[in-house]
Amino acid sequence: MTPASPHRPHFHLPAAVAVLSLLLGLAGSSSSESLPASTRMLPLELARLFPHLTNTPEPLRRPRPVPTAIPATVAPPVAPRLDPQVAERYLLSLPFGGEIRRAARQNRIDELLVASVVEAESSFRPDAVSEKGALGLMQLMPFHLEGVEEPLDPAVNLALGAGYLAELEARYGGDVRLTLAAYHAGPGAVARWGGIPPYASTRTYIGRVLALYEEHQRKLGIDGEDLRLAAATPPTFQRGS
């Protein structure tokens, strides 16, 4: 007998393809776990069976941040500061503007507030005298002028009046309304009523001063050529009673 030749296994082609596909599938799955889904490649046989797995998913989109309210600690936008030279020219355009500026700066009080008080009190008349005896630009009472030789002198009257106004402002913690109420009716009336006295004249006075103060600020808020014209041309003021 001739020796039998060694038995060689015969693989059918479909079975070989299936085994190869299975091996490739296992290898592909183990090596692609660390890759993003969009880079995975499926074996041919699995791709035929599961065609939906071959679709590349869309990249993840980050959600847009939801706008939140501004925290209370964030300060509101600050308006641009006015050119000091422009503000100074405007102040000097007012009657007795130089004396008002000097008295206000010496007492560290708002120059336009002093100017508004002067306008409301005397309409910028240095020789004004009221029925109650108030004198000068800031209508100071005689007890404010003890020992003063020239109470109607603009520089003297403004220095004393601005100093008194600054004292009241410090006393009431910067409250402009209480400051004006005390300047008109006296600190005793403010203390007696626990605030602004219910006097019609005092309330009218406070409203007038604040209106003038706002008007001066508004004129300084004009931009461009109008601001330069306002600073160069003295405004027209109505004389009070």
Image: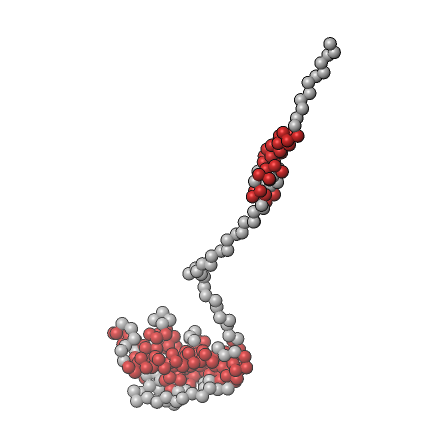
Task: Tell me the residue at 63%/29% (across/down).
Answer: 15
Q: Quadrant of residue 21?
A: top right
Task: Tell me the residue at 51%/74% (across/down).
Answer: 82
Task: Tell me the residue at 65%/28% (across/down).
Answer: 12
**How many discs appear?**
0
Name the spot of residue 231 as percent of width and height, x first: 51, 83
Front in this rendered view, residue 28 or 150: 28
Quadrant for the N terminus in the image: top right
Task: Tell me the residue at 50%/55% (across/down).
Answer: 64
Front in this rendered view, residue 86 or 156: 86
Q: Quadrant of residue 4?
A: top right
Direction from residue 187 to residue 74 in the image, left or right: right
Direction from residue 105 to residue 135 in the image, left or right: left
Name the spot of residue 95 as percent of width and height, x first: 45, 86
Name the spot of residue 43 as percent of width and height, x first: 62, 37
Identify whether 101 is placed above or below 42.
below
Identify whether 61 is placed above or below 10.
below
Q: Quadrant of residue 76?
A: bottom left
Quadrant for the C terminus in the image: bottom left
Can residue 145 be seen at all in this image of the molecule? no
Q: Find the residue positioned furthest to the right.
A: 2
Identify whether 131 is placed above or below 112.
below
Identify whether 224 is placed above or below 55.
below
Name the spot of residue 83 as percent of width and height, x first: 53, 75
Q: Find the residue positioned furthest to the top.
A: 1
Can residue 21 be seen at all in this image of the molecule? yes
